[in-house]
Amino acid sequence: MKRIFTFVLLSIFTMMSVNATTETTLWEGDVNVNWGDSNVQIEAASFANIPVDASITMYFQIVDMSEGYHCLRVTTPWWEGAPDFVPQVDGLTQEQSPYTFTFKASDKSNVETTGAMLFVGYGYKLTKIVATYDEPEPVVIDDLPAATLWTGEQEVSGWGAKVMMIDAEGGLLPIFAETITKACNLYFLVDNATGGDFRIAGAWGDWAQTSYPSDGYNHMQALDADNVVKVVMDETFVQKAFIENGGMAIWGDGGFIIKAIGTTKDSVFNTDGINTVATGVKNDTRYYNLNGQVVAHPTKGVYIKGGKKILVK
């Protein structure tokens, strides 16, 4: 009986889905932190793959100071004008090592906007900073039906400039509005790809506020041997950037050129079907909600019909 009971327990434990825990070292060294004279700065690129709700842990040792004063602060390179990641902690003691804080969604936006996370304070020696998080369950997002959404030659260079996929009247290019209504993959054919990176955000508003944790700076890391970059756009990103914020704006650096954008990899090489796809969608008289689902009997609210937003009163 005891063996049967043990076997059942082991079977239950084996069937449980347990996410793997990952620890990423963001920085390691030996720095006596002394306000602006000596600190540790970790650039935004190091946080590109760190998910929201990760634990950031600082390992340190208290340094004897004549004043007996020890404090810790985690801020931005701006020092002022942006929220601290950790407001100043006065009276820091050795017992508080390691010191851990949670990497919130607002922190991820903050580090992307200001370019780095800065560890400052007084009277302690910083030796290691790590991020710990559970690996999320993989989410598989399928390709949409093959469609070439755009072809041309748009240089992406300098973070101060942006390329917006809008028409002459300021509306999202019709084929984007018709096609990007739910989670999907986008494929970018790139030329002159010697380096650099780009990100996607909503077409309107402050780019730091209309891009989301699902989008980072590191898309060019996915560049394959055919010079194609695959960008996975989850439901939240499509809803916020494409539907609520007017479409797609692209920022980047490095001076590379985007030649085509499509819903499948093959579609960026084959542009023959672009008009056919657009016409077929425009003739669709069905109503869709903002998640891209067909609504047979629409009530009050905002819907998509014929590739355009409409308000049903």
Image (cartoon, rainbow, N blue to C red):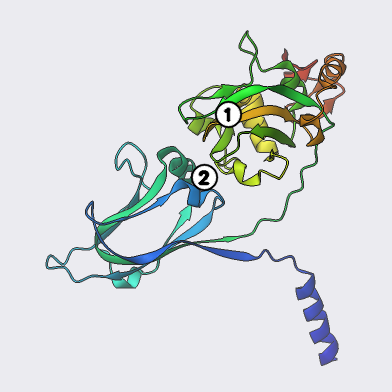
* Left or right, 165 with reference to 40: right
Q: How busy is the neighbourhood of tag 2: few (under 14 within 10 Å), some, or many (20 plus)?
A: some
Amino acid carrying label 1: it is Ile
Q: Residue 52 carries which label?
A: none
Q: Is residue 258 above or below residue 63?
A: above
Element on which disc 1 rests? strand
Q: Which residue is drawn at 71% across and 22% down?
A: 151
Q: Which mark is residue 250?
A: 1
Whole-angstrom CA distance, mark 1 to mark 2, is 21 Å
Residue 233, visible in the rendered structure: no
Q: Looking at the picture, how far across and down is residue 14, in whole percent? A: 78, 74
Q: In this view, does 201 lie above or below 35?
A: above
Residue that label 2 marks: 105
Q: Earlier in the sequence, mark 1 or mark 2?
A: 2
Q: How busy is the neighbourhood of tag 1: few (under 14 within 10 Å), some, or many (20 plus)?
A: some
Q: Which residue is drawn at 49% across and 33% down?
A: 208
Query: Which residue reaches farthest top?
Result: 169
Q: Is residue 185 above or below residue 249?
A: below
Q: Nearer the viewer, mark 1 or mark 2?
A: 1
16 or 222, which lies in front? 222
Quarter of image, res 236: top right
Residue 288, visible in the rendered structure: yes
115 or 6, which lies in front? 115
